[in-house]
Amino acid sequence: MIRVVVADDQALLRGSFRVLVDSEPDLEVVGEAATGSEAVALAMNARPDVVLMDVRMPEMDGIEATRRIRDVCRVLVVTMFDLDSYVYDALRAGASGFLLKDTPPVDLLAAIRVVASGEALLAPKVTRRLIEEFTRTPAVPRVKGLDGVTEREREVLTLIARGLSNNEIAAHLQVSLATVKTHITRLLAKVEARDRAQLVIAAYESGLVSTAG
């Protein structure tokens, strides 16, 4: 059972998310928070697998709340705003995913499962804008270059940057899922990336793929 906390300052949205999540046999809402500080306290006490975190909340915003609980649980930021700064700040704070509130319900449920499984997830609608922001202002390298990365690992990295899941990468390259995971583990170490989102950034910053591609 995947245990979920819903953090949003709007009671109607919290209730809607609860009904949606609780409708799934493998998902369970274990608490609701109306402020960032409540979200932190609830996460510390309930130890959920995933927190659905709004960005704009009273007392403490969702970015700071994410920063405080990132070592306790995984955070999926769900917001109305797709501004680059929110995406960037959420990922830097340690969020594992970023979705907009107009995301179809089935995609939101899938995102919770993806994040709970240990993978990072970005809404396709905002991924290009995020990458453009990183490549437009690369004053400080955020990840290492691709020195030492093998040709096969470059293939995997390219597919990650294109938004493919591990299963899709395995099918595309005709290799096992375990092999894909091994390549990703090696990529994370070689480019000193924290997670899948930073691997996407590495692919664009290195020129392996481009925003025009």
Image: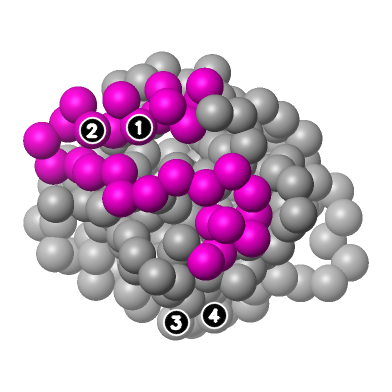
**Residue at mark 4:** 192
Residue 202: image tag: none
Q: CA distance from mark 1 to mark 3?
A: 37 Å
Residue 101 visible in rendering: yes
Quarter of the image where one finds residue 22: top left
Indicate the amino acid at tag 3: Ala
Relative image position of residue 125 (x, y in whole percent): 58, 26
Magenta range is 12-41
Q: Residue at x 30, y 25 (%)?
A: 20
**Residue at mark 2:** 22
Quarter holding the C terminus is top right
| SS for dot 1 | helix
Q: Are marks 4 and 2 in contact (CB under 8 Å)?
A: no
**Residue at mark 3:** 189
Relative image position of residue 34 (x, y in whole percent): 59, 43
Q: Are marks 3 and 4 in contact (CB under 8 Å)?
A: yes
Mark 1 or mark 3, whichever is nearer to me: 1
